[in-house]
Image (spheres, rainbow, N blue to C red):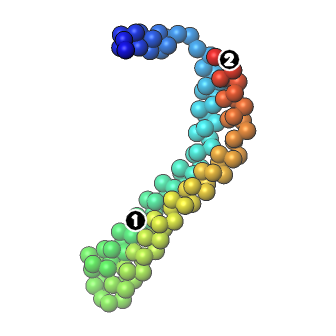
Amino acid sequence: MNTDKIYAEQLANEYAPKDTSKVVALRKLDKKAKLPANIFTYSLGILSALVFGIGMCLGMRVIGSGSTASFVAGIIIGIIGMIGMGVNLPIYKKLLEKGKQKYAFEIIELAKTISDKE
């Protein structure tokens, strides 16, 4: 296996003129299909982790009055945060699947036109 030949081909491909408008459009469609799921997942994950952290702080009496009511509220708030983190992945998968189904036809057609040219 000639690594110099592989390297030379890789560099030649990098500098060769390409019809990138369709490739760029394909990447944009892919991002457009995945973006809503990613935004929702990151938002829910961050919010759930913060809620869980507040619950832990209340439960360990770092914040709050240190009373039993504060302790119980911390446990309940922490459980709500854990539930939010637990449902995050299944929701992400469903949202991602919806986004992929929405743009599947356009992406497949554009990918076919790109692959037929080569």
Q: Name the residue: 37% across, 79% down.
A: 74
| Lower position in the chain sequence, tag 1 or tag 2 | 1
Q: Nearer the viewer, residue 73 or 19?
A: 19
Whether 102 is drawn above or below 91: the answer is above
Q: Name the residue: 69% across, 42% down.
A: 103
In the rendered structure, find residue 112 and report the number of the disc placed on it.
none
SS for tag 2?
Answer: helix
Tell me: 23 left or right of 11: right
Tell me: 70 left or right of 88: left
Tell me: 92 left or right of 48: right
Q: Name the residue: 60% across, 38% down.
A: 30
Tell me: 8 left or right of 17: left
Q: Name the residue: 37% across, 80% down.
A: 75
The residue beneath circle 1 is 50
Q: Position of residue 107 (x, y in %)?
A: 68, 35
Q: Disc 1 residue type? A: Leu
Q: Residues within 10 Å of mark 2 (few under 14, many from 20)?
A: few
Q: Is residue 46 visible?
A: yes
Quadrant where the image shows the C terminus: top right
Q: Quadrant of residue 19?
A: top right
Q: Position of residue 108 (x, y in %)?
A: 69, 34
- Outermost residue on the bottom side: it is 68
Q: How many marks?
A: 2
In the rendered structure, find residue 117 and report the number of the disc placed on it.
2
Whether 67 is drawn above or below 115: the answer is below
